[in-house]
Amino acid sequence: MHPRIDHIHITVEDLERAETFYDQLLPLLGFDISLKERELIPEHEYRLVEYHHRNFSIGLVNQRESYKGDKPSRRRAGALHHLAFHVDSPAEVNALYRKIRDLPAQIIHSPQHYPEYCPDYYALFFKDSEGIEYEIVSFGREHCFP
């Protein structure tokens, strides 16, 4: 078996704010916004904005009203700690960094080497409009995990 991710759905506090952010971020990562879809299931208090790419889809789901005011924590069991996007080169990490700085993103760590992960591991860490952490990384995965 070759493991593959088909789709990821992330619950967000403010769906409209998140959609505005992801409309800007995801094209930088190769997504075509014209493939974006919406779904509404009122009886489950469920709204979804889903962005599709041939490799996988990423969706934004509204939080339930009963959770309003709860502070998200990436260290809570069941939470997404962070999501990493792999790119082909450190130059691509740097180019994305210059574009992501212009978004309403919070840069956690500007691009740098992390040899403690893998000798050529080069990454950028940032948070989206909802406080969810992302990473843009380049490294020779096949050398570290043959």
Image (cartoon, helix red, strand yellow):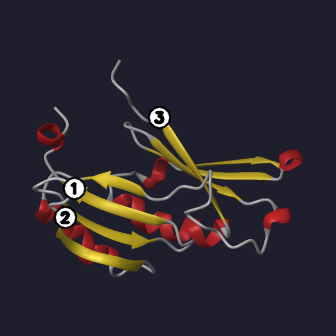
Q: Nearer the viewer, residue 75 or 101?
A: 75
**Residue 92 sits above or below residue 143 on the image:** below
- Is residue 69 depicted above or below 54 in this figure? below
Amino acid type at mark 2: Tyr
User: Where does the image place residue 71, in percent across and percent down from the top left?
Assistant: 69, 73
Between 17 and 76, the one nearer to me in the picture: 76
Residue 137 lies in quadrant: bottom left
Q: Which residue is mark 2?
A: 114
- The kind of secondary structure element at disc 2 is loop
From the image, tell me which residue sits under label 3. Answer: 6
- Label 1 CA crowd tier, 10 Å (few <14, some 14–19, many 20+): few
What label does residue 98 carry, if any?
none
Distance of label 2 from label 3 (alpha carbons): 28 Å
Reading the chain from its start, which is encountered first: label 2 or label 3?
3
Dot 1 amino acid type: Tyr
Quadrant for the N terminus in the image: top left
Quarter-of-image position of residue 111: bottom left
Separation of residues labelled 1 and 2 (CA atoms): 6 Å
Q: Residue beneath label 1, please?
A: 117
Q: Residue at x 33, y 80 (%)?
A: 101
Q: Amino acid at mark 3?
A: Asp
Q: Is residue 50 left or right of residue 65?
A: left
Q: Is residue 23 left or right of residue 70?
A: left
Q: Position of residue 61 (x, y in %)?
A: 66, 54
Dot 3 or dot 1, earlier in sequence: 3
Helix, strand or loop at disc 3?
A: loop
Q: Nearer the viewer, residue 23 or 75?
A: 75
Q: Residue at x 89, y 46 (%)?
A: 43
Q: Quadrant of the C terminus?
A: top left
Residue located farthest toward the right when viewing the structure as drawn: 43
Camera sees residue 33? yes
